Image: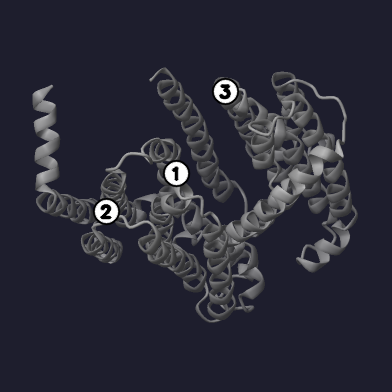
Amino acid sequence: MSNLKKLAGQTAIYGLSSILARSINFLMIFVYTSYLNKEAVGSFTGIYALIGFLNIVFTYGMETSFFRFSTGKNLDPAKVYNTTQSLLITSTLVLGGGLYLAAPWLSELLNYPDQAYLFRWTALILSFDAILAIPFAKLRLSNRAFAFAGAKMINVLLNVFFTLLLIIWIPELISAGYLQEGWLGYQLNWGIEYILLANLFANGLIIPYIWWKAGFFSFSLDTEIIQPMWKYAIPLLFMGLAGVTNELVSRLLFEYLLPENFYPGLNPREAAAIFGTSVKLAILMNLVIQAFKYAAEPFFFGKSSDKNSPQLYANVMHAFIIFCSLLMVAISVNLDLIGYLFPAGAGYDTAFFIVPILLMGYLLLGVYFNLSIWFKITDQTKYSFWITLAGAVVSLVVIFTTVPVLGYLGGALSTLICYLVMTSMCYYYGQRNFPIPYQTSRDLSYLVIAFGLSYAGFFMDLGSVGLNFFAKNSLVLVFLAWLGYREKNLVLAVLQRKKSR
């Protein structure tokens, strides 16, 4: 019992720190859209999608391999740590150096002429991320949850500090006459540059702290450890690439697939800024899924030997769909209020109509996570690779065929269809290999009704902000009341349990 309590406590710490960090990063989009032009925000959308993709390449599954080979392989954990960290530093020098040298070519390829420095900084950010990966993993392996969470939060807060300093505070000091433009090379016309520099400064400053907390290493490349780790890591690399393709490829490719003048008055990069902002709003659903994942994964595995576990998994799925369906409606009907947080007349709200589609897509990703328990507890994780790969292929096909024709809608559909395919495949193979009595018909009806109400509320316009607020949110209350009626047995059981206490 004490071990379970310890695990639950650490899960809460990891989950809270991750969700808080993601929430802070989410809020930064309002800073970017308020103080930077759409060109800069579009660059942020594309370059950070590239960073997310290349992060997988730079670490190539070594975090998971480190966990695996530090436990249960009769190897000295210190030796595994030294070898893994040394290997990552060596490969980072090669990959980071190659990207640094290729920066001029990459800047031309991605339509950033005379801005090769952006990709040199990108190479440094990726390199710092890679050499921090194993020390962070060691903190987790050593059950030092507070040290891990504290380091993550320091890193995020440093990033926020440098972002505010470079984008808001220094320009205000220049405007007030306290500083001159050109102070330490500062340029008022920079945008994405300062987002990258803030990230670079934050990552660079945290390295000594993490190495101190995790313990310094001695350089060692033990081939007896490297060879099996390499074989173990390569499949994880391809699985990670497929997964990140599903998540980021629409943001990475959007501006390059959108025809010129598709949206009057916007070039493709500015349109990508508007698209990326709508994706960020939909990631509110992902925050909930992340919280659920941290709490549910140890719970699922802990109950796997229970003969009643299939029914338990079905009940968890049902509760998850109820909550997330309600959340989807609540976000969608209030998108007009969220729009007030963006600069007036900037046009970021012109793509808000795709947010319910994106919310549904991310909700299905959460459903997929619930469904995936079958192949995790039956050790048939090969299905994960093939399902994720199928999702990546579908995502790419939809993006290439729909974005040039449908613009924002095409990008959103790629997310929805990708996760719909993955969810359907996981459900089909799961019910064949490990049947779970999901309430499929009822759950699907909740999803369909929630999706319909989301768009009904989004398009509702009674001509007054106050009237709209009450009318739109009445749909949330109606949906909540209907869910309560349909789930009256569940509600009564919860009330009865509280009463018995």
Identify the residue position indicated by label 1 in the image: 287
The disc, 1 or 3, on the residue closer to the chain's N-terminal end is 3
The disc, 2 or 1, on the residue closer to the chain's N-terminal end is 1
From the viewer's side, name the closer residue of 127 and 283: 127
Using the image, determine if residue 29 lies above or below residue 428: above
The disc, 3 or 2, on the residue closer to the chain's N-terminal end is 3
Q: CA distance from mark 1 to mark 3?
A: 24 Å
Residue 143 tag number: 3
Identify the residue position indicated by label 2 in the image: 465
From the viewer's side, name the closer residue of 443 and 100: 443
Colour theme: one colour
**Residue depicted at x 48% and y 58%:** 278
Q: CA distance from mark 3 to mark 2?
A: 50 Å
Q: Residues within 10 Å of mark 1 (few under 14, many from 20)?
A: some
**Residue depicted at x 48% and y 49%:** 376
* The N terminus - image quarter: top left
* Mark 1 vs mark 3: in front: 3
**Residue depicted at x 61% and y 28%:** 141
Drawn side of residue 110 relative to residue 300, left or right: right
Residue type of the residue flagged with mark 3: Asn
* Mark 3 vs mark 2: in front: 3
Judging from the image, what secondary structure is the residue with disc 2 in? helix
Residue type of the residue flagged with mark 2: Val
